Amino acid sequence: MSEARRTYADRQVIIAVCIAVLICLAFLAGFAVGDMEWVARIRSSLLQMLQR
């Protein structure tokens, strides 16, 4: 039981790291393009996804 819970927690951590990397890439792309509205739109959609 605890092992299954551990793998689930590891999966949650991996998903969180992937989301953080995607956010960083989105910010870098937004700064490179200079379109901050696009970055804000992605950030708000990600926050809505996390709050679910």
Image (tube, grey):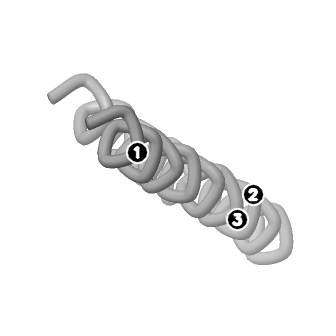
Secondary structure category for the residue under label 2:
helix
Whether 33 is drawn above or below 7: the answer is: below
Whether 30 is drawn above or below 50: the answer is: below
Of residue 32 and residue 6, the one placed in the foreground of this image is: 6
* Image disc number at residue 3: 1
Q: Earlier in the sequence, mark 2 or mark 3?
A: 2
Of residue 32 and residue 7, the one placed in the foreground of this image is: 7
Q: Is residue 9 left or right of residue 17?
A: left
From the image, state whether disc 1 or disc 2 is nearer to you. Answer: 1
Number of residues whose C-alpha sits closer than 10 Å to that of mark 3, classed few (under 14), some (14–19) or many (20 or more): some
The residue to which callout 3 is attached is: 30
- The picture places residue 50, in percent across and down from the top left corner, at 32, 33
Q: Earlier in the sequence, mark 1 or mark 2?
A: 1
Cα separation, mark 1 vs mark 2, equals 32 Å
Q: In the rendered image, which quarter contains the N terminus?
A: top left
Cα separation, mark 2 vs mark 3, equals 10 Å
Q: Amino acid at mark 3?
A: Gly
Q: Are marks 1 and 3 in contact (CB under 8 Å)?
A: no
Q: Amino acid at mark 2?
A: Cys
Q: Is residue 4 left or right of residue 26?
A: left
Q: Residue at x 70, y 65 (%)?
A: 30
From the image, state whether disc 2 or disc 3 is nearer to you. Answer: 2
Q: Residue at x 65, y 50 (%)?
A: 20
The image quarter containing residue 51 is top left
The residue to which callout 2 is attached is: 24
Whether 5 is drawn above or below 13: the answer is: above
Cα separation, mark 1 vs mark 3, equals 40 Å
- The picture places residue 15, in percent across and down from the top left corner, at 48, 56
